[in-house]
Image (cartoon, rainbow, N blue to C red):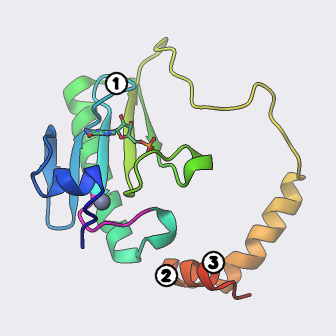
Amino acid sequence: MSDRECIFCAIIEGHAPAEVVFEDGDTLAFMDINPANPGHTLVIPKRHIQDIYGMDEDTAAAVIGTVVRVAGAIKRALQPEGMNLVQSNERAGGQDVFHFHMHIIPRWYGDGLRLARPPEVRRTMPIKEAAARIRREVAKVRTIAAAYTDICCGKK
Ligand code: 5GP
Ligand code: ZN
């Protein structure tokens, strides 16, 4: 299932160019067009899934499997000193392309790259309280799909 407006679906279908580094039945890995560092790669599911809330477990497993494989290849190919996995959801989370993707970003000492973070750590909620709230919800949620259903339908 693809989305005609989606640039990543266009890449999957071969209608837009990309530097593909790996492909299997469910996933595609290709170079980010505007790399944060050399080797910056994106891994996407071939099915158009907008964000983490639409993700199913099988697709998630396929995506992370490709992330592990490609991260290993980048480590061997470019010998980075570190590696970040980044995944953004919704505009407020910094998502710009609304087809689920994981960034694999190689890191080197002194590369100057900073993941966005406010200058002071803001704690508008005590850590323990946030943990307690999340634990209550995680106990109710057996699958990722169930988590999505609960969000979309407002169930408790
Ligand atoms: P986001 O901000 O949604 O987490 O990341 C979107 C990423 O997609 C950005 O890093 C951006 O450079 C990359 N990107 C956007 N359009 C294209 C494209 O047409 N081709 C490729 N290869 N990368 C793209
Ligand atoms: Zn898409």
Which three-letter amino acid code belongs to the residue tagged 3?
Answer: Ile
Q: How far apart are the two marked residues, 3 and 2, measured between alpha carbons? A: 10 Å
Give the magenta range.
45-50
Mark 3 = which residue? 151
Ligand 1 quadrant in view: top left
Which three-letter amino acid code belongs to the residue tagged 1?
Answer: Pro
Q: Nearer the viewer, mark 3 or mark 2?
A: 3
**In the picture, residue 18 is in which quadrant?**
top left
Looking at the image, is 25 positioned above or below residue 126? below
Q: Earlier in the sequence, mark 3 or mark 2?
A: 2
Q: Residues within 10 Å of mark 2 (few under 14, many from 20)?
A: some
Query: Residue 136: percent from the left, percent from the top?
Result: 77, 77
Mark 2 = which residue? 145
Residue 140 included in the magenta stretch of the image: no
Which three-letter amino acid code belongs to the residue tagged 2?
Answer: Ala
Q: Earlier in the sequence, mark 2 or mark 1?
A: 1
Query: Residue 4: percent from the left, percent from the top?
Result: 25, 62
Mark 1 = which residue? 80
> Regarding mark 2 in the picture, which secondary structure is present there?
helix
Residue sitting at the far left: 14
